[in-house]
Amino acid sequence: MSENVYEIYENKAHLARKSADRRSAEVWAMDKRIAEIDKELSATGLKLLSAALLDDGKREEAYKRLEADIFALRDEKKKRLIALGLPEDYTDVKYQCEKCSDTGYVGIKMCECMKRALTKQNYKSSGIGKYLEGQTFDNFDLSLYPFGEARENMSRIFNQARSFADSFSPDSSESLFFMGGTGLGKTHLSSAIAKEVIEKGYSVVYDSAQNIISTFERERFARDESVLKSQKYFDAQLLIIDDFGTEIQSKSSISYFYTLINTRLISSKPTIISTNLSGKELNSQYDSRIVSRILGEYTIRQFMGEDIRKLKK
Ligand SMILES: [Zn+2]
């Protein structure tokens, strides 16, 4: 039910041990001797402890005897399991990941298996569809931009975007404002950044301005929801707002955006906003409080040139 990776991991090792316990109980019912063996084996820890308290001379000898006992007991158990037609490791705890025993951590470092699970979860919750996932830095084609100023400009923006993704930090990366007409690669670069940041294990939410407004609007009329869907826009370590300026503007939409943009700025959470509107259009069409917040605090990237989607054809 729960989709949270941390919660899943908290339970994982516990479940692995529980299912081993179940297999043990099953085996004990079939073979009483195995139950005795397991009892003796689980008592060896205590025996080792008391051996440690012996005098130097006797200690070694006690250790050796215990070791031989354990070996003999394990061997007998193996044989009895095989005689029952079961694998010899049938009652062992079986972790999905042996490196971290399903705890998600090796020492204090996060295990690769947990990183992969987080990445998967982050893709799922990011709102990045299959189409956008395919837009990467590798397949961004600079040669589509006309040679000269447009390409130089694009190549600069491209490199800046890549270094933004490479050095992404959820509490110190700058916020970006992508400006320029349609079809100049704003969405492509935003998705490429999103993908890289997700691969690093950070949470990303990618959505259009209109969708964000609709989410807020829906919640205004359904207050009983215990978990607000709009919370993800505040929580995401990177928020990408696409098509800013195409949403229907109203008093409430302005206040949603102002709150969102402002809250993220105050808590130093990076946001990328892209718009097809020119500076002039922004100033004339948009609420000045929001425009001045963005222009004042975001790093502006001006995309130039013709719609490259037309050039691709
Ligand atoms: Zn692991």
Image (cartoon, rainbow, N blue to C red):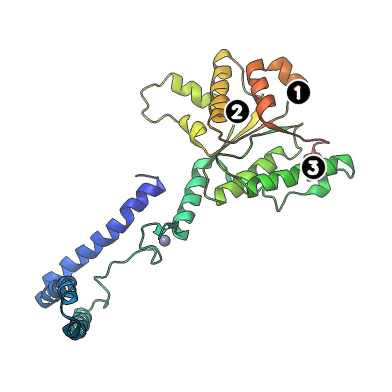
Q: How crowded is mark 3: few (under 14 residues within 10 Å), some or many (20 or more)?
A: many
Q: Image height check: is 4 above or below 300? A: below
Residue at image location 64% in from the left, 34% down from the top: 175
Say which of 64 and 307 sits in front.
64
Q: How crowded is mark 1: few (under 14 residues within 10 Å), some or many (20 or more)?
A: some
Q: What percent of the width, then of the height, locates residue 146?
A: 87, 43
- Marks 2 and 1 sit apart, C-alpha to C-alpha, by 18 Å
User: Which residue is disc 3 drawn over?
Assistant: 154
Q: What residue type is labelled 3?
A: Met
Q: What percent of the width, then of the height, locates residue 165?
A: 64, 46
**Quadrant containing the C terminus in the rendered view:** top right
Q: Is mark 1 on a helix, strand or loop?
A: helix
Residue at image location 74% in from the left, 45% down from the top: 158
- Is 217 on the left or on the right of 241, as rendered? left
Displayed-image quarter of ligand 1 = bottom left
Place residue 77 in its image quadrant: bottom left
User: Which residue is disc 1 drawn over?
Assistant: 279
Q: Would you say residue 287 is visible in this rendering?
A: no
Say which of 207 and 271 sits in front.
271
User: Which residue is disc 2 drawn over?
Assistant: 209
- Is 220 on the left or on the right of 39, as rendered? right
Q: What residue type is labelled 1?
A: Gly
Q: What element carries label 3?
A: helix
In this view, the mark in front (2 or 1): 1
- Marks 1 and 3 sit apart, C-alpha to C-alpha, by 19 Å
Q: What percent of the width, then of the height, locates residue 31?
A: 12, 75
